[in-house]
Amino acid sequence: MAAVWDVRPGEVAGMLTGARSTTVRVNRLHDDPPALDLAPVEWCTDAYYGTVDAALAHEGRVYLQNASSLIPVVALDPRPGQSIVDVAAAPGGKAFHIAARVGNDCELWLNDAVKPRAEKLRALASLYRVRYAQLTTVPAQYLDKELPVASFDRILLDVQCSGEGRVDLRRSDALRYWSEERIEKYKYLQTKMLDAGYRLLKPGGRMVYSTCTISPEENEYPVSQVLRRHAELDLVPLPFAEPNFRPGLTAWRDHRFDPRLAGATRVLPTEAYEGFFAAVLVKT
C-alpha cells in the first residue's frame, strides 16, 4: 500500500487506523430540509462536515455518509431529464444523491443483485422521497442483457470490492476477509461490469466507476481494460480536488495501464475521507 500511495511504509498503519468522520447531506427532496451551521464540503452542494442529531436521518431529512462517497455523484454530473442507472445501488446513498441533485427530474433505474438489499433500498427510497422508474435485481455483469443497450445518459458503477479503504487496524478482525485471491476474483468481475456498462451507455454519455478499495487490480486494471477494448471511451479528470487526492497509477508491478489512468483519482485516507478510487468515463 505504501507503493500505491507513494508514502513511507511506516505511515500506512496510521492511515488505516481510526474511525472516519461522517458528512451530512441535506435532502432537498424532503418537505422540511434542515438548515445546518456546519462547515460545507466546498465541491458538493448541500453537504457538510460534522454531525447532527440521528433523528434527522431517521426522518429522511439528511443522509449520513463518508465524504468519499459524495465523489461519484458529483463526478457523474446528472442533469434533469436524463436516463440514469445506478448499477449497484444499495444501500442507496448515491442513488438518493442523484435524485436530489436533479430534483427527481430524471428517469432513474435502480439495480442491486442482492434481493434483501434491494428491498431495503425500496423502503429507504420512500423515506427519502426518491422517485425511480424501475428497481431490478440483476447481477451487474449481466445488466446489459436485461436493460436496453445504448439507452442511458449516465451510469453509476460503484462496484462490489474488497473494501480495503474502510479497513480499521484497531480491530483484530480487520483483515479477516482479505486475500489476494479475493482481489483477483473481483478484478475480473469488475471488468465484466464495466463492459456491460459500456454497452448500456449512450453516445455522449458519462459513466463513473468507483470503489472503496486500494488495490490497483480492482481500480486501474479494469478501467484500463475497458479503455483498450472500446475506442469510443475516454477518461476525463474530476472537476474538483482535495489535498489528499492523488492521480491514478499508469503502472503497477508487471502491469502497464492505459496512460489516461493518470486522470483518475485516488483518495488517500484521512480523518475525513475513506480510501477511495474514482474514474470518469465518457463515450465519445
Image (spheres, grey):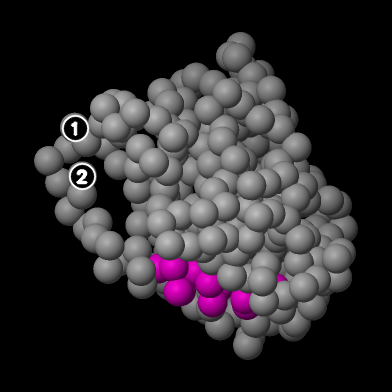
Report whether residue 129 is seen: no
Secondary structure state at the residue bearing disc 1: loop
Residue 3: x %, y % from top left: 39, 41
- Residue 216 location in percent, x, y? 45, 55
Q: Where does the N terminus fall, quadrant-wise?
A: top left
Q: Amino acid at mark 1?
A: Arg
Query: Is residue 195 found inside the magenta-colored segment of the image?
Result: yes
Say if the magenta span includes residue 2.
no
- The answer to whether 232 appears left or right of 58 in the picture is right
Q: In the depicted view, which residue is nearer to us: 56 or 164?
A: 164
Q: Which residue is mark 1?
A: 170
- Which residues, given as a range, are shown in magenta? 186-198
Please say if 2 is above or below 110: above
Mark 2–mark 1 contact, CB under 8 Å?
yes
Residue type at tag 2: Ala
Residue pointed to by mark 2: 174
Q: For residue 166, what is the image quadrant?
A: top left
Q: Nearer the viewer, residue 105 or 190?
A: 190
| 218 sits left or right of 37 in the view | left
